[in-house]
Amino acid sequence: MRTRPLGTNGPQVSALGLGCMGMSALYGDADRAESIATVHAALEAGVTLLDTGDFYAMGHNEMLIGEALRTAPAALREQARTSVKFGALRDPDGGWGGHDGRPAAVKNFVAYSLQRLGVDHIDVYRIARADPGVPIEETVGAIAELVEKGHVRYIGLSEVGADTIRRAAATAPISDLQIEYSLISRGIEDEVLPTTRELGISITAYGVLSRGLISGHFTADRQLGANDFRSMSPRFQGENLRHNLTLVEALRKVAEQKGVSVAQIAIAWVLSRGEDIVPLVGARTRQRLTEALGALDVTLDAGDLTAIEEAVPDGAAAGDRYPRAQMAHLGTER
Ligand SMILES: NC(=O)c1ccc[n+]([C@@H]2O[C@H](COP(=O)([O-])OP(=O)(O)OC[C@H]3O[C@@H](n4cnc5c(N)ncnc54)[C@H](OP(=O)(O)O)[C@@H]3O)[C@@H](O)[C@H]2O)c1
């Protein structure tokens, strides 16, 4: 497995990370046994970075990862690096209630996460969205205290803009910014990516398949449950979806010419953007994982990159990447 650094002072991790969210929440039902088998298969293949959030089905995802780690051979368990998001507030009906980045809350959140994961430290800890009521210096400062005490190893950020990145980095060393980045979500290229590169911060990229939309497996007639994020996502609605799937068909032609799958070419494109970028793939079955790992063997030359960008030009997607209310929590958008 190739590795990449998380920032100038973070850990070296596998070039692809496993995003575990869909094993518990947001993309409809998942199979628990298959989810755990997928985590084990990822570790066996050399994946070291496992990403989760304490609010993914209210601790369910952390407990699932905890079980996967507990039941993995010791050597695989030791290679795993956990990346945990906190701060998003939920209610018993699954509703969202803003973000809490107060230092006392940060310490409370981590205590519960350590217990659910069954570990004595978390490798990378980050607030899911900056709390508008708490200066980022206070939230990051609280995580820095957790680093000093050994409960956390490194500090990350998630979905914040350039100013917040600079303020956070002036408070404590930051390993990586987790943010959406894909062929159809290239907003970070204007300001965020130049800023992280200047400051020696890596990107852990999520949504590299745009939540399955550009995986090559998504079809217009797919039925989405009410608890599926995509049933509310603008990119998956009506005319937007039809348009976006025409981009996928154009990408499929490029993939077929190279003898790879659509998902593989989409992941390989993100991998090609720099050694400071680690895609998190949301595989929740071993079959999807195998496909995603195949992207590591895809080399894109200049001709391939031109063909890909002609098939899916920058800004070609129809619809925002989040529903309007959630867009308001993002630190950056164009
Ligand atoms: N910081 C943040 O704000 C934030 C937000 C969202 C996610 N994340 C993190 O990033 C991770 C990845 O995000 P994501 O799940 O949205 O990413 P994604 O990889 O773009 O989407 C995952 C979806 O793609 C589908 N898919 C089809 N082929 C696939 C393949 N070969 N490999 C993997 N997935 C394939 C999956 O399908 P099936 O339906 O067949 O399983 C799943 O529905 C999450 O698990 C989470 O840890 C962070």
Image: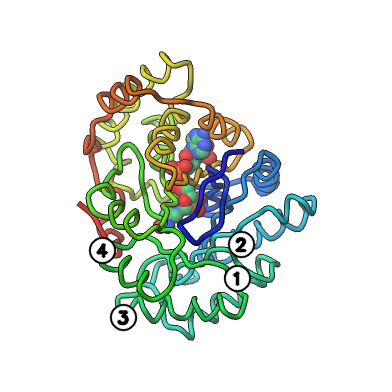
Percent coordinates x, y for residue 113 in the rendering = 60, 70
Q: Which mark is residue 133?
A: 3
Percent coordinates x, y for residue 221 in the rendering = 39, 31
Pointers 2 and 1 in contact (C-beta within 8 Å): yes
Percent coordinates x, y for residue 295 in the rendering = 51, 31
Q: Amino acid at mark 2?
A: Glu
Q: Could you tell me which residue is drawn at 58 percent across and 63 percent down? A: 123
Distance from disc 3 to disc 1, alpha carbons, whole Å, reads 23 Å
Q: Earlier in the sequence, mark 4 or mark 2?
A: 2
Q: Earlier in the sequence, mark 2 or mark 1?
A: 2
Q: Earlier in the sequence, mark 3 or mark 4?
A: 3
Q: Amino acid at mark 3?
A: Gly
Residue occupied by mark 1: 113
Secondary structure beneath dot 1 equals helix
* Circle 3 or circle 4, nearest the eye: 3
Secondary structure beneath dot 2 equals helix
Q: Could you tell me which residue is drawn at 49 percent across and 64 percent down? A: 85
Q: Earlier in the sequence, mark 3 or mark 2?
A: 2
| Structural crowding at the residue carrying mark 3, measured as other residues with C-alpha within 10 Å and reported as few (<14), some (14–19) or many (≥20) | few
Residue occupied by mark 2: 62
Pointers 3 and 4 in contact (C-beta within 8 Å): no
Q: Which mark is residue 328?
A: 4
Q: Earlier in the sequence, mark 3 or mark 1?
A: 1
Q: Is residue 26 visible?
A: no
